[in-house]
Amino acid sequence: MEALEMLWSYMQEDMKADRLNNSIRNSPLRQKAEKARARYGELQKAYRQIEEQTAIYADRRDALQDALSRAQAQLEAVTSRCNENPPADAEQTQAVIAEVEKLVSGLRSYESDLRRIQKESAEFVNRSAEILANAAKTRKEFEDLKEQYAAASDEKKQEYHKLRASADAKAVGIPEELMAVYNTVKKQISPPMARLVNMQCSGCNTSQPSAALRKIDAGTDIVECETCGRILIK
């Protein structure tokens, strides 16, 4: 089948182009650049998280400071009230003492929380500075690797485009339906075609049934290996 021979010839150039493209994509420089870019993205995410947490802490700090001011004002009001109108008896004295103890306890709790938040906020500031420095360093590393990769792969890319153009030229005249089958098979296995050698698929070395052999001999149908799925050509 002439169309299959044309497809076979196309496949030789197609596979060469694919192999070269894969070598470009799998370049150690490219992989290092991709890792650097991923690290940079992770650092950006970490910095955003710290910014969000810092904003939450700032709101919490403001709320604690407001609560602390209110508690201090309430304590001053109790003190002023007692100075102006001292408790008349033991019961009133106990009530005032209980009120003051509650306010003082609240003040201590607010002050403790405020100190903790201020400490953690300072740690966030230091951490964000560290992340920014690492992000700047990682971004430069990525840009340098990207530039090195581009320079190293430029010649290979030119060769790839030549191979791809050669493959496209060999595709001219191949029936669209045959090319469609080729591309479908190629998504599953590569190379997508195999020669029939001693009644076996040369791709997976599996013997083919007599019905498939007759179709291949007739040259009227597209025959795929029942085991690996490759298009068979005699």
Image (cartoon, rainbow, N blue to C red):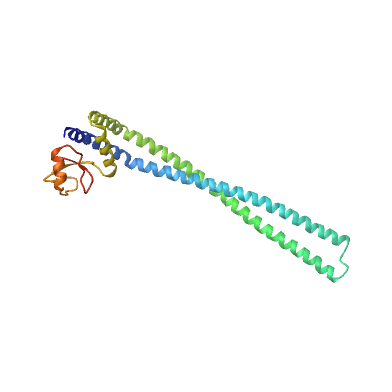
The N terminus lies in quadrant? top left
Q: Residue furthest bottom?
A: 90
Q: Residue 210: horizontal and vertical position, in percent? A: 13, 47
Does residue 201 appear anywhere in the picture?
no
Q: Residue 51: horizontal and vertical position, in percent? A: 57, 46
Q: Give the residue at x 39% y 42%.
A: 34
Q: Give the residue at x 55% y 48%.
A: 50
| Between 80 and 180, the one nearer to me in the picture | 180
- Looking at the image, residue 228 sits to the left or right of residue 41; the answer is left
| Between 171 and 142, the one nearer to me in the picture | 171
Q: Give the residue at x 17% y 34%.
A: 5
Q: Residue 75: horizontal and vertical position, in percent? A: 78, 59
Q: Is residue 10 above or below residue 43?
A: above
Q: Give the residue at x 36% y 36%.
A: 148
- Looking at the image, residue 50 sits to the left or right of residue 93; the answer is left
* Quarter assignment of residue 100: bottom right
